[in-house]
Image: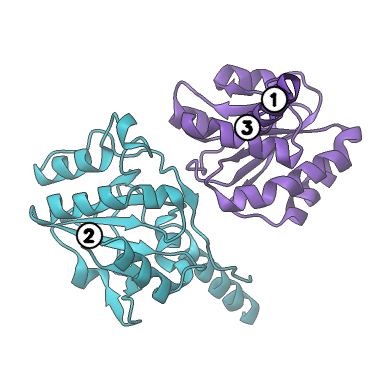
Chain colours: A cyan, B purple
């Protein structure tokens, strides 16, 4: 009996670690940290539409999007979209994230996902990688911001298209794309 | 004097330009399939880019692995995900790292399908290293920074 309970606990812990915020599924509340280390919850930060963007201090692909992220924030915040820019890299502590945000003139706050807990729940792999959550709490878009690191070669503004659709109450035509960039530098977890 | 100037100019040109015999070749869906089909080799595909620090850190170790296991049938195939304007720096880095050619740059028709065909759990984020057995079947994926000993363990099971 004792062994059964032990295995049940192990299985439950394993299930909790697996991806559970999938495209098309509803998400639960989660906690991240502001750059002063204070916990913040999704339920308090979310809007009618919320864009979650995993970003990096050091990744050149993520940095290639700094101006585009500022423009997205400016263009869509005024339409009611809330943005959560998250840094889940274990190699990039909060002071470095704050300095990077200041250097790059980010108009938006950046949060830390300590222990990449939220990245694990979304199964986010890259920076930059985005998720759009609608008013029901459902993941309606997952993928890249657009289709080229080089602004001159952009053919599809995936995130803008998704946000426009959700704001218009329409389904997202292209709900999933590949998020290219650098892998998220996760903490090593012992089993 | 003219001869000296010509030699000097030639030397400068050699330093400035990579070896033209070693150009990056295009890797598309067909080339990828052909590389695997009937190769009879264990193939380690390394997707990398000049902007990817962990990729550049890993590549020399992968070259060493290939040298160690080449005699038993290992081939390392590098595929750069660089933009066109970075292809010359990519080539220079490959030459400096002692990579065997041909080496490739990714120019696929459909990036999403290509990435999915390699590993559905891979987003295309770098680094990405993929090991295929002699029959052309994928044996292991190493997504993100990977300890070289993990790759060597997987190789040991195939070679």
In this view, the residue in front, A48 or B26, is: B26
Q: Residue at x 51, y 44 (%)?
A: B121
Residue beneath disc 1: B5
Q: Position of residue A35 (x, y in %)?
A: 33, 76
Looking at the rendered structure, the secondary structure element under dot 3 is helix
Q: Residue at x 45, y 61 (%)?
A: A120
Residue farthest to the front? B1
In this view, the residue in front, A54 or A73, is: A73
Mark-to-mark CA distance, 1 and 3: 16 Å
Residue beneath disc 2: A83
Q: Position of residue A13 (x, y in %)?
A: 51, 71
Q: Is residue A72 above or below residue B17?
A: below
Q: Give the label, 3 or 2, closer to the camera.
A: 3
Q: Is residue A39 above or below residue B25?
A: below
Q: Quadrant of residue B33?
A: top right
Q: Is residue A49 above or below residue A146?
A: below
Residue beneath disc 3: B16
Q: Residue at x 73, y 41 (%)?
A: B97
Mark 1 or mark 3: which comes first in sequence?
1
Looking at the rendered structure, the secondary structure element under dot 1 is helix
Quadrant in which the N terminus of chain B appears: top right
């Amino acid at each position: 009996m004792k062994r059964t309970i032990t295995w049940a606990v192990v299985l439950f812990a394993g299930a909790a670690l697996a991806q559970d915020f999938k495209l098309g599924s509803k998400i639960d509340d989660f906690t991240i940290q502001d750059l002063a280390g204070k916990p913040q919850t999704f339920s308090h930060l979310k809007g009618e539409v919320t864009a979650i963007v995993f970003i990096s201090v050091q990744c050149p692909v993520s940095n290639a999007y700094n101006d585009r992220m500022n423009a997205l924030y400016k263009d869509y915040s005024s339409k009611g979209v809330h943005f959560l820019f998250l840094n889940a890299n274990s190699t990039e502590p909060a002071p470095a994230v704050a300095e990077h945000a200041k250097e790059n003139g980010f108009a938006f706050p950046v949060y830390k996902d300590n222990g990449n807990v939220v990245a694990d729940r979304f199964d986010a792999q890259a920076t930059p990688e985005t998720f759009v959550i609608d008013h029901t709490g459902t993941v309606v878009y997952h993928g890249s911001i657009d289709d080229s690191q080089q602004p001159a070669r952009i053919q599809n503004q995936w995130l803008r298209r998704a946000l426009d659709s959700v704001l218009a109450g329409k389904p997202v035509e292209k709900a999933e794309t590949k998020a290219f960039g650098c892998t998220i530098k996760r903490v090593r977890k012992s089993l | 004097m003219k001869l000296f100037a010509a030699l000097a100019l030639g030397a400068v040109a050699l330093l400035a330009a990579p070896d033209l015999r070693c150009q990056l070749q295009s890797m598309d869906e067909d080339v990828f399939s052909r590389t695997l089909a009937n190769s009879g080799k264990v193939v380690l595909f390394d997707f990398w880019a000049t902007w990817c620090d962990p990729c550049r850190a890993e590549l020399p170790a992968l070259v060493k692995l290939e040298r160690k296991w080449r005699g038993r049938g290992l081939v390392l195939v590098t595929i750069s995900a660089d933009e066109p304007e970075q292809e010359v720096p990519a080539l220079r880095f490959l030459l400096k790292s002692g990579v065997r050619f041909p080496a490739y740059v990714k120019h696929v028709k459909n990036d999403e399908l290509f990435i999915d065909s390699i590993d559905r759990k891979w987003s295309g984020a770098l680094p990405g290293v993929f090991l295929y057995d002699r029959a052309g079947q994928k044996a292991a994926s190493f997504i993100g920074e990977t300890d070289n000993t993990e790759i060597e363990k997987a190789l040991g099971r195939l070679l």
